[in-house]
Image (tube, helix red, strand yellow):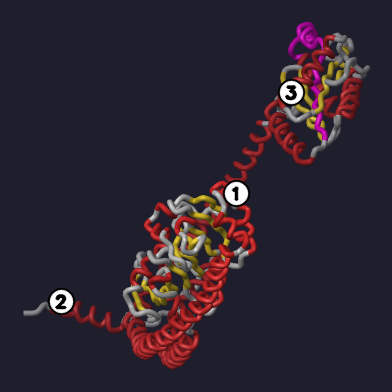
C-alpha cells in the first residue's frame, strides 16, 4: 500500500514546481530565445558565409593582381637603372679599376644609392665572394644558401639578402660576359616597397606582403607576423595561384589567404601574399549586420509585447517587495507588504520579508545606541591621538618644538630650497655660563630660566621662523627665505632681547641676567656642512667673549 503522507509530499512538490516563478520565467525565456535563434541563425549562417566569401574571393585576387602590376613595373625600372650603372662612366671605372681603386669607390656607390629611386645600399662582390666594397650594410649573404647568385648571368637577378631582416636585392655582373670582373649588388629600399604595397592594402582589412623563395619577409604592410607569413607562403604555394584558401596559422588562428607569384621561377621565385584572420576579413560587412539587427529587433518587439502582458501580472508582487526593500534601505522597517496569498516563491518571500522587517525594527534601536557609543569612543580616541601627536613634537619643559620636529622641518625646508632657490639660514643659540648658574641657583631655578629665555625668544622671532630646543641649554632657529645678513640681524635682535631682560628666580630677590652666544650660517647645498658652519660660528662666539653673534663667513663678532 502506498503511504498517504508520501503521496501528499510528492503532489505538493509537483504543484510547487508547476506554480514556481522560475518555471514561468524559464518558459518565457525559452519561447523567446528559441524562436529568435532559429530565425536569426538560419539567416546569419547562410548569408554570412555566402556573402562574405564572395567578397573576399573577389577582392583578394584583384588586389594581388594590381599590386603585382605596380611592383613589376617598379622592379623593371630598378633593373634598368642597375644595368645602366656599369655602362656609365663611374661604372666603367669600377669595372676596369684596380682592387685598390675599387676599395676607394664607396663614395661613388653612396652617391648612386642616394640619388636612386629604388635602392638604399650597393656593394661590389669579387669573383671569390668577398665583399670588396659594401655601402649600406648588405651583410654576409655569400655565406648563406642563397649564395648561388654569385654565378650571376648577364641579366639582373632577384635575390634575397639574409640577416636579422631579410632584404630584397638585385644582382648583375659588373662587366657583362666577364665573370672575373665581379658582381654589383643593389638592395631594394624596403620603405619604397612597402609604400607600393600600402596603396593596395588600404582597401583591404588584411596584411599584404612580398615574400622571398623561402618565405622570408621582404616587405610587409599590416599586422601579420614573419612566422605566420612564412607558414602562409609554404601553405599557399601548393595551391592554385591567385585563389583564396582557408588554413590555420601557427598560432591556430583560422586564416584566409591568397598567393600570386611575382614572376617566373628564374625571376627569383618572389610572391605577393595577402592574408587575414577569418574574423577580421568578415568584420566589415555592415550591410549584413544591419539585416540581422533589423530582423532581431522585429522579433524582439513581438516577444516584448507578449512578455509585457504576461509579466504585468507576474511581477506585481515583486514590485511590492522592491518598494518595501527601498523603504527598508532608508531605515523604515515599520512597513508590511500585503501577502499575495500564493504558495510560490513570491508568497514565501513576502512572508519571510515581513518577519525580517519586524526583527529589524526591534534591533534598530539597539544598533542606534551601539553606534552612538562607538561614535563617542571614536571621538575620545581621536582627541587622545591629537594630544599624543602634539606631545611627540613638543619639548616638555619649554613647550617649544623639540629636536625631532626640527630635523623633520629642516628636511622639508631643504627640499623646498632646492626647488625655489630662496635662501635658508640657521641660528644656533647657547646660554652663556648656564652650568654655573644651574649649580649656583639649583636645577629648579635653571629650568625656570630656560623657560623664560624660551618665552623671550619665541616672542622675538618672526612667525615664519621655526624655534626649537636643540638640547640642554641650546636652541636653534630655522629662518626661511632669509640670507646670511638677515639672519645676523635676527640673531642680534634675539641676543639683545635676552640680555635686556632681568630675572628674579629665588627668595633672594636679586635679579639675574642671562646672555646668549649665537652662531649663524646660510645653507649652501650640503646639510652636514650647514650645521658644521653654524656650530663653528657658535664656538667662535664663545671663544671671543660670549654674548655676541658670529656669522659663518665673518671674521669678527657683531655687538
Determine the residue positioned at 84% across, 19% down.
518
Which residue is labeled 1 in the image?
104
Q: Compared with residue 276, is residue 376 higher up or lower down, i.e. above or below?
A: above
Q: CA distance from mark 3 to mark 2?
A: 96 Å
Percent coordinates x, y for residue 91 in the rendering: 58, 60
Determine whether the residue tagged by mark 2 lies in a helix, strand or loop. helix
Determine whether the residue tagged by mark 1 lies in a helix, strand or loop. loop
Residue 197, visible in the rendered structure = no
Which residue is labeled 2 in the image?
6
Nearer to us of marks 2 and 1 is: 1
Q: Compared with residue 401, is residue 139 higher up or lower down, i.e. above or below?
A: below
* Residue placed most toward the observer, 455 or 49: 49
- Provide the residue span drawn in magenta: 423-445
Which residue is labeled 3 in the image?
529
Residue 542, visible in the rendered structure = yes
Q: Earlier in the sequence, mark 3 or mark 2?
A: 2
Q: Residues within 10 Å of mark 2 (few under 14, many from 20)?
A: few
Q: Earlier in the sequence, mark 3 or mark 1?
A: 1
Q: CA distance from mark 3 to mark 1?
A: 62 Å
Determine whether the residue tagged by mark 3 lies in a helix, strand or loop. helix
In-image side of 374 versus 345 (left or right):
right
Percent coordinates x, y for residue 218 in the rendering: 47, 65
In the rendered image, which quarter contains the N terminus? bottom left
Residue 112 picture quarter: bottom right
In magenta segment, residue 426: yes
Residue 93 picture quarter: bottom right
**Mark 3 touches mark 2? (CB < 8 Å):** no
In-image side of 199 versus 529 (left or right):
left
Residue 381 picture quarter: top right
Q: CA distance from mark 2 to mark 1?
A: 108 Å
Determine the residue positioned at 85% across, 33% down.
482
Determine the residue positioned at 50% across, 81% down.
66
Amino acid at each position: 500500500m502506498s503511504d498517504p503522507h508520501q503521496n501528499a509530499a510528492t503532489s505538493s512538490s509537483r504543484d510547487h514546481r508547476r506554480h514556481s516563478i522560475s518555471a514561468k520565467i524559464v518558459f518565457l525565456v525559452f519561447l523567446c530565445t528559441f524562436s529568435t535563434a532559429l530565425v536569426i541563425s538560419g539567416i546569419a549562417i547562410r548569408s554570412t558565409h555566402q556573402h562574405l566569401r564572395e567578397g573576399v574571393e573577389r577582392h583578394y585576387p584583384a588586389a594581388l593582381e594590381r599590386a603585382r602590376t605596380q611592383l613589376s613595373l617598379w622592379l623593371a625600372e630598378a633593373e634598368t637603372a642597375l644595368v645602366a650603372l656599369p655602362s656609365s662612366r663611374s661604372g666603367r671605372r669600377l669595372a676596369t679599376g684596380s682592387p685598390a681603386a675599387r676599395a676607394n669607390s664607396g663614395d661613388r656607390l653612396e652617391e648612386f644609392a642616394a640619388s636612386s629611386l629604388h635602392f638604399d645600399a650597393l656593394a661590389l662582390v669579387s669573383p671569390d665572394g668577398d665583399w670588396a666594397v659594401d655601402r649600406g650594410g648588405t651583410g654576409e649573404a655569400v655565406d648563406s644558401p642563397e649564395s648561388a647568385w654569385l654565378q650571376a648571368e648577364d641579366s639582373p637577378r632577384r635575390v634575397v639578402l639574409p640577416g636579422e631582416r631579410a632584404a630584397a636585392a638585385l644582382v648583375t655582373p659588373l662587366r657583362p660576359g666577364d665573370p672575373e670582373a665581379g658582381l654589383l649588388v643593389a638592395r631594394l629600399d624596403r620603405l619604397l616597397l612597402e609604400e607600393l604595397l600600402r596603396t593596395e592594402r588600404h582597401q583591404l582589412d588584411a596584411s599584404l606582403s612580398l615574400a622571398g623563395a623561402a618565405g622570408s619577409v621582404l616587405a610587409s604592410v599590416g599586422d601579420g607576423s614573419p612566422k605566420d607569413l612564412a607558414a602562409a607562403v609554404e601553405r599557399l604555394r601548393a595551391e592554385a595561384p591567385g585563389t583564396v584558401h582557408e588554413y590555420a596559422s601557427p598560432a591556430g588562428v583560422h586564416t584566409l589567404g591568397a598567393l600570386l607569384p611575382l614572376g617566373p621561377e628564374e625571376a627569383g621565385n618572389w610572391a605577393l601574399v595577402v592574408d587575414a584572420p577569418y574574423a577580421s576579413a568578415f568584420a566589415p560587412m555592415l550591410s549584413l549586420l544591419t539585416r540581422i539587427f533589423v530582423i532581431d529587433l522585429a522579433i524582439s518587439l513581438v516577444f516584448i509585447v507578449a512578455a509585457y502582458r504576461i509579466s504585468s501580472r507576474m511581477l506585481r508582487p515583486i514590485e511590492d517587495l522592491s518598494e518595501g526593500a527601498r523603504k527598508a534601505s532608508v531605515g523604515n522597517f515599520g512597513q508590511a507588504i500585503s501577502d499575495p496569498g500564493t504558495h510560490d516563491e513570491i508568497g514565501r518571500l513576502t512572508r519571510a520579508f515581513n518577519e525580517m522587517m519586524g526583527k529589524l525594527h526591534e534591533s534598530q534601536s539597539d544598533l542606534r545606541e551601539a553606534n552612538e557609543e562607538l561614535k563617542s569612543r571614536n571621538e575620545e580616541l581621536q582627541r587622545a591621538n591629537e594630544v599624543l601627536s602634539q606631545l611627540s613634537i613638543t619639548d616638555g619643559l619649554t613647550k617649544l618644538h623639540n629636536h625631532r620636529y626640527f630635523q623633520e622641518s629642516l628636511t622639508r625646508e631643504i627640499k623646498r630650497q632646492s626647488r625655489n632657490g630662496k635662501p635658508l639660514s640657521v641660528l644656533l643659540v647657547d646660554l652663556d655660563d648656564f652650568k654655573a648658574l644651574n649649580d649656583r641657583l639649583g636645577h629648579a631655578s635653571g629650568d625656570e630660566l630656560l623657560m623664560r629665555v624660551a618665552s623671550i625668544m619665541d616672542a622675538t622671532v618672526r612667525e615664519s621662523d621655526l624655534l626649537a630646543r636643540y638640547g640642554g641649554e641650546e636652541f636653534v632657529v630655522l629662518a626661511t627665505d632669509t640670507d646670511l645678513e638677515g639672519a645676523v640681524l635676527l640673531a642680534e635682535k634675539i641676543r639683545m632681547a635676552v640680555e635686556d631682560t632681568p630675572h628674579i628666580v629665588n627668595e633672594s630677590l636679586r635679579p639675574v641676567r642671562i646672555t646668549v652666544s649665537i652662531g649663524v650660517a646660510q645653507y649652501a647645498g650640503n646639510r652636514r656642512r650647514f650645521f658644521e658652519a653654524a656650530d663653528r660660528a657658535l664656538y667662535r662666539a664663545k671663544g671671543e667673549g660670549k654674548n655676541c653673534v658670529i656669522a659663518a663667513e665673518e671674521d669678527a663678532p657683531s655687538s
